[in-house]
Image: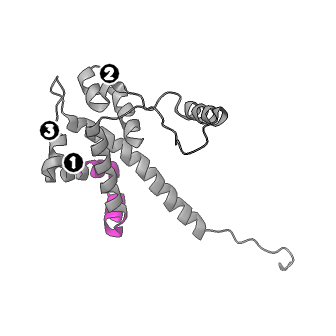
Amino acid sequence: SLSGYAAKNIIKNVKNCTSCIDLLSPGKASLTPVFDTDEENDENKIEAKEGFLRLITRGGLIKPSDALFVACCHSWSLYQSIVNNDNSKNLLLASHNSRATFIEVLIQKLDQNESSRKLLEIKCQKTHYFKDHIKKAGQTMFNLFAKNLINDRNSAIHQTRKRIIKDPKSSTN
């Protein structure tokens, strides 16, 4: 999951505080894939699925904490509301640092609602604020989201710049 990816990125930089790591991923739990039981469960299919997952995950998927998952959901919701509004999207893209602007708006959005404000107030046992981890998760999420936005915009630009191929028979010398 994207929130698990965010947890993994943050955990790489939070090596000194096991309490923070537990806030991000309780017990640094690995995700265990569950396959549909409706399908025919022959051994070859199961082994193929498990082999595919081992290949793509390399054992690196981790389960995010509920708090981090919720924060990432808020991040996605905010991003969607921005990109679905042309004015908001243009303002974000025109800002000097789009990612920093996005993070600041995310924190403000979380602070406006009593239940989401509680995410900002969580502290680990060593009194590090979860808010700092939310910012890092928001940065990771923004990078993922923005990459797709930029790819879509580039594709649209390339669509309008189709090359006109001259017919060699129609050219005059």
Q: Which residue in the structure is indicated by mark 1?
A: 107
Res 137 visible: yes
Residue 92 magenta-drawn?
A: yes
- Residue 77, horizontal then vertical, whole percent: 31, 55
Q: Which residue is mark 2?
A: 15
The residue segment tinted magenta is: 84-104
Q: Circle 1 sits in a helix, a strand or a loop, which is it?
A: helix
Q: Quadrant of residue 156?
A: bottom right
Q: Residue at x 27, y 48 (%)?
A: 103
Apparent side of residue 54 relative to residue 139 in the rendered image (left or right): right
- The main secondary structure of the magenta stretch is helix
Give me the residue at 81% from left, 75% from top. Answer: 167
Between the residue at mark 1 and the residue at mark 2, the CA separation in whole angstroms equals 24 Å
- Which quadrant: the N terminus? top left
Compared with 135, 151 (above or below) is below
Residue 98 x %, y %: 33, 52
Residue at numbered disc 3: 121
